[in-house]
Image: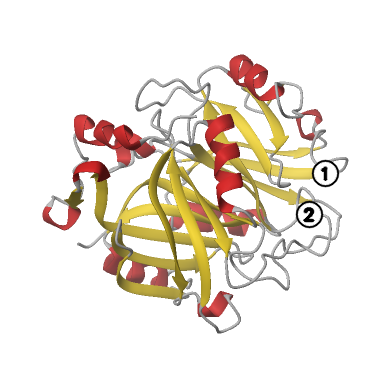
Amino acid sequence: MSEPLISGIQQIGIGNTSVYDTWEWYRKNLGMDLPVFDEAAEAALMLPYTEGQPRSRHAILALNMMGGGGAEIWQYTSRVGQAAKFDVKLGDLGIFAAKFKSPNIAKSHQALSNNNKVSEIAKTPEGKDHFYLYDPFGNPIEVVESNNWFGKGISHSGGVYGAVIGVSNIDRSKDFYKNILGFDVVVYDTQGKYDDFAYLDGSNQEFRRVLLRHSKERVGPFSKLLGSGEIELVQAINKETNKIFKDRMWGDLGYIHLCFDIVGMDALREKCKQANCPFTVDSGDFDMGEAAGHFAYIEDPDGALIEFVETHKVPILKKINWYLDLKKRPAGKSLPRWMLKAMGLSRVRN
């Protein structure tokens, strides 16, 4: 394959100290109730980001069958995950907030207001409704308006739609997210102080913010389920910033990576090398029992970790031991909707 394919945002990684408590909150509040895998194992290949030593962990990848990316709930078991030694604020460098999508912002706002403190509904610079909250573990979340859906569900919201990422040079970062990940549409590029940021820590100052989307429809086996996505880059103006994961390990508390489902890892490796952002981790083929594939990592210009996963095997219905071998399917072809919907039979009910 000469050109790699991106199927969409597969998941955002969330480092925490209690994997089941964290998943329970995301399941009950944001409909992330389909566990693709739930496994304790050793993270032996992330040595550049784990101080050169393999580390034991427990991870759950949960999806929302309305559509969107998943949440990889990730906990160290060989050590206690560490929080930042400073208060993380808007504009700090790295993945600051996860974006979740909603078909009805007012309904999501009401549902999340029942048990959580949320911001008021406000307009983005694009003119769309959105709001923010912090999960009980201190992670910022933005809920944004979307009309891109895989299916209907009982949740008020869908899955992960993207991320808010703090950067030091927004033009350099725009090029990275365009050239490597296909986010080639600039929805807005604006600078100033923003009322819709008021709820967030460190928001009372000037920022430049750029919202990126992709012009090409995502293709690949899971593209119908994962859907479209967006990235908002935020640069603090005239303010000193910290790297969110300064002096910490991947897997510590917070948003540890943004992961894209891809097809064509060899072609992507070459593309990243040519763009002067080579793979920093390259797993080769892996088999986690419930899932198998190939993963790799690169860094954005400020060191935020971007993961790529090429899936080879995925559970469709675990109860009857039904697993799908994706290596036998045409590279750019989406799985049929009925097969993707069959994954929903493994949902965990609240």
Which residue is more in the foreground, 17 or 113?
17
Residue at horizontal 70 percent and vertical 21 percent from the top: 114
267 sits to left or right of 252 = left
Q: Which picture quadrant has residue 97? A: top right
Give the percent coordinates (x, y) of residue 206: 83, 43
The answer to whether residue 220 of the structure is visible from this angle is no
Give the percent coordinates (x, y) of residue 169: 68, 58
SS for callout 1: loop
Image quarter (top left, top right, bottom left or bottom right) of the N terminus: bottom left
Residue at horizontal 52 percent and vertical 71 percent from the top: 56
Which residue is more in the foreground, 348 or 101?
348
The answer to whether residue 173 of the structure is visible from this angle is yes
Q: Which picture quadrant has residue 35? A: top left
Q: Which residue is mark 2?
A: 88
SS for callout 2: loop
Q: Alpha-carbon neighbours of circle 1 within 10 Å: few (<14), some, or many (≥20)?
A: few
Give the percent coordinates (x, y) of residue 321: 20, 48
Identity, as a three-letter code, of the amino acid under mark 1? Asp
Label pair 1/2, CB-CB below 8 angstroms: yes
Q: Which residue is mark 1?
A: 201
Identity, as a three-letter code, of the amino acid under mark 2? Val
Which residue is more in the foreground, 74 or 242?
74
